[in-house]
Amino acid sequence: MDKELLRIVIIATGLLIVVGMLTWAYFKNQRLQAQWDAEDDLAFKEEYASSLKAETLYAMEEEDTVDPHYYDKDDAVFEPEADDLEPSPRFSVPGVIQFSLIANAPEGFNGGDLDQAFGIVGLEYGSLRIYERLDANRLVDFGVACMQESGTFPSEDLDDFYCRGLVFFMQPGVLDDAHLVFDDFIETLQILAVELDGTILDHHREPLTDETIFQFRQSL
């Protein structure tokens, strides 16, 4: 595939994901408008994540399974035999990895601050009006879109622009060294979270953990 065409395919895939996510969020917020306003978006994500975990735990308790740690009358701990434990399913990395950075400030990220922070981590403003990490051959390793309807950033009047969050996306299947790019992807996210005062969310819109990072990297 032509390198320029491949670059466009990677970026277009990310933009489609952003648009789909924003469309879902719009209709969801329409139904819940009486309970939440736009300023409560981050609180809603955290509440949703907590309820999802609670539902999962409840479902596990409903199953007829035996607690692997149990006690006899002397409170001695017995461990189940290894053969009795079912192996957990192998984690499968998605075709497009997508994490988010949500502003902690209610007004969101300022455009001027974004441009300065992107410069610190070496992201470049591209022809599709998003920021990109380019390799030595000027091909896209990963992209950063704005969590707005268009997903793009303006090229001027940045101090008057505000963005509630950022969407980071990469397509490991088309990269020569997905492990190195993923490490850079995570490091860039973490640096920007400090520089911009934001919270990193994973693909389930939950706070990103070291365990999730490890799962993704081991599956590349």
Image (cartoon, rainbow, N blue to C red):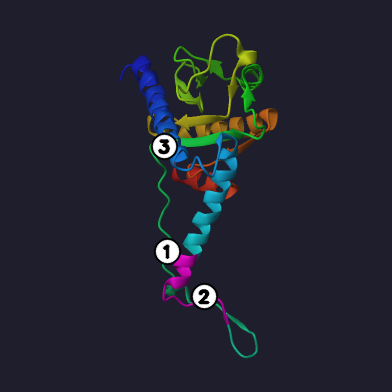
Q: Nearer the viewer, mark 2 or mark 3?
A: 3
Residue position marked by numbered label 2 in the rendering = 68
Visible residue check, residue 25: yes
* Mark 2 residue type: Pro
- Residue at image location 47% in from the left, 78% down from the top: 66
Q: Is residue 197 covered in magenta?
A: no
Q: Is residue 62 covered in magenta?
A: yes
Instruction: Look at the image and tell me in which quarter the N terminus lies.
Output: top left
Q: Dot 3, how many residues are within 10 Å of its Cα: few (below 14), some (14-19), or many (20+)? A: few
- Residue at image location 60% in from the left, 10% down from the top: 157
Q: Residue furthest front?
A: 34
Q: Dot 1, how many residues are within 10 Å of its Cα: few (below 14), some (14-19), or many (20+)? A: few
Q: Quadrant of residue 194?
A: top right
Could you say where residue 169 lies in the image, as x and y percent from the top left? Answer: 47, 31
Q: Nearer the viewer, mark 1 or mark 2?
A: 2
Of residues 48 and 57, which is closer to you in this image?
Answer: 48
Q: Which residues are magenta?
A: 58-70
CA–CA distance between discs 3 and 1?
39 Å
- Residue at image location 67% in from the left, 28% down from the top: 196
Q: Secondary structure at mark 2?
A: loop
3 and 1 marks in contact (CB < 8 Å): no
2 and 3 marks in contact (CB < 8 Å): no
Q: Secondary structure at mark 1?
A: loop
Disc on res. 169: none
Residue position marked by numbered label 1 in the rendering = 87
Q: Is residue 106 above or below residue 157?
A: below
Could you say where residue 61 lies in the image, as x and y percent from the top left? Answer: 48, 71
* Mark 1 residue type: Pro
Residue position marked by numbered label 3 in the rendering = 27
